[in-house]
Image: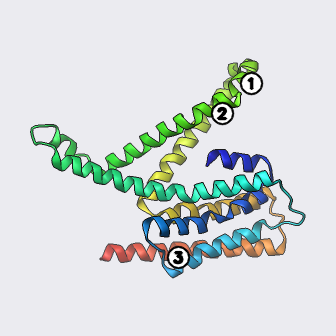
Amino acid sequence: MILFSNVAYAGTSIPIYTMIRIGVVPLTIIFTTLINGTFPSIAVLVASLSGALGLLVTCIRQDMRTSPVVIVAGILSSGCAGLFPVLLVNTHATLIGSIRTAASNRPSTDLYHTAATTPADTRATYQLLHYLSMISLIILFPVVLLSGELQQISGEFQHLNSWWHWLMMGCASAGTFAVLVGTVLLAKVTSPLTVNFLTVPMYTIMVTVLSKFMLEIYSWVGVALVATSCLWFWRERRMESKRRASE
């Protein structure tokens, strides 16, 4: 997902990149329905699709051109982004089931009582973060070797002596780790659709700010539609959580 997203982002502008990835929200709904067998309420469905439509209207520009490689990379990135939180929720539920099964079959003379003080939910979350980190390293490290980045780094070794370089690397690593943990926790306590719907206001604000607030009239209509959809989505999700809590 990161590789496809970087290819799409590097080869075009922010509005075109956002338009290419506009299908993340609809794909999340489709994957959630096909894999989990759950379907959002009509109000949540309309609010989420309206937000995606508003983002599309916000990003429309005249004379928009890009290469087919960027379009293909953006579509593949959208598919991976829509599938990722769905797999997170399913994997977390599977880990909880395996932990509870192992705890129920463990003899009382073992460390059962000590392990029982840690909730299965928390242990499953830590295991999921550990698995994600290991899989990311296993996948990305060969890519670094095959791409020839190590030779370029060795040719520019003087940059490694700069404190600014290591500061930026540290900030980027901390930010990436915070996004990973936040995505896992948000998908666990809410839903995959909520995780990806948050990108709609994020991209809207980003496009508006980078355009220096100089948008066309129809783009401002799209911004207003996104804001209304976000309030509607938040209201419906809040009402659903209250209904589940009352039950």
Q: How many numbered discs sit on the rendered protein? A: 3
Query: N-terminal of the two: label 2 or label 3?
Result: 3
Query: Which of pointers 2 and 1 indicates the residue nearer the eye?
Result: 1
At a point 78% along the width and 60% down the height, the residue shown is 15
Q: Is mark 3 on a helix, strand or loop?
A: helix
Tell which of 48 and 225 is nearer to you: 48
Q: Mark 3: few, some, or many residues within 10 Å (few <14, many ≥20)?
A: many
User: Callout 2 environment at 10 Å: few (<14), some (14 to 19), or many (20+)?
Assistant: few
Give the Cα separation between the discs numbered 2 and 3.
Answer: 39 Å
Q: Circle 2 — which element?
A: helix
Specify the label residue 168 is tagged with.
Answer: 2
Q: What residue type is labelled 1?
A: Gln
The x and y percentages for residue 135 are 49, 39
Mark 1 or mark 3: which comes first in sequence?
3
Left or right of 111 on screen, residue 83: right
Instruction: Name the kind of residue labelled 2 in the image.
Output: Met
Q: Compared to 38, does 172 lie above or below?
A: above
| Cα–Cα gap, marks 2 and 1 | 18 Å
The residue that disc 1 covers is: 152
Badge 3 amino acid: Val
Question: Any mark on residue 44, and which?
Answer: 3
Q: How crowded is mark 1: few (under 14 residues within 10 Å), some or many (20 or more)?
A: few
